[in-house]
Amino acid sequence: MASLGERKSEFAGAEAASHHKKIAELASAEFPGYELAYMIEYGVYGLANAVASE
């Protein structure tokens, strides 16, 4: 599996939203009892944007 840094161009391109959603889905699956699942999406969005801007 490629690291986020290796795929940073994908987080700023046309497919960015689908990548953010997939990462959020994977994270949510790991923490099914987390009551504020929407916060995972915010975190993924911020992380992906930070990686893409490096």
Image (spheres, rainbow, N blue to C red):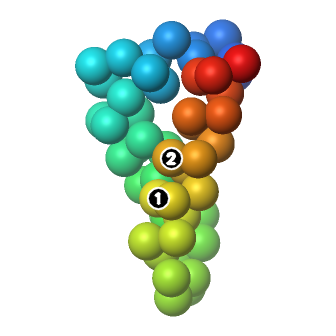
Q: Amino acid at mark 1?
A: Glu
Quick check: 44 left or right of 2? Answer: left
Above or below residue 54? Residue 16 is below
Residue 26 shows up from this direction: no
Q: Residue at x 59, y 72 (%)?
A: 31
Q: Residue at x 51, y 88 (%)?
A: 35
Q: Please tell me the numbered disc located at residue 45.
A: 2
Q: Please tell me the numbered disc located at residue 11.
A: none
Q: Residue at x 56, y 34 (%)?
A: 49
Q: Is 22 in front, or is 40?
A: 40
Q: Is 42 in front, or is 18?
A: 42
Determine whether the residue tagged by mark 1 lies in a helix, strand or loop: helix
Q: CA distance from mark 1 to mark 2?
A: 6 Å
Above or below residue 10? Residue 24 is below
Please identify the quarter of the rendering in which residue 13 is found. top left
- Asked if marks 1 and 2 touch (Cβ < 8 Å), the reply is yes
Above or below residue 39? Residue 8 is above
Q: Position of residue 44 (x, y in %)?
A: 55, 49
Q: Position of residue 41 (x, y in %)?
A: 47, 59
Name the residue at the front extreme.
53
Residue 5 shows up from this direction: yes
If the image is split into quadrants, where does the C terminus sit?
top right
Please rate how many residues cluster around mark 2, counting C-alpha atoms within 10 Å: few if below 14, some from 14 to 19, many from 20.
some
Please identify the quarter of the rendering in which residue 14 is found. top left
Quick check: 52 left or right of 13? Answer: right
Q: Amino acid at mark 2?
A: Tyr
Above or below residue 42? Residue 44 is above
Q: Is 3 in front, or is 8?
A: 8
Q: Residue at x 51, y 82 (%)?
A: 36
Q: Position of residue 37 (x, y in %)?
A: 47, 75
Determine whether the residue tagged by mark 2 lies in a helix, strand or loop: helix
Q: Which residue is mark 1?
A: 41
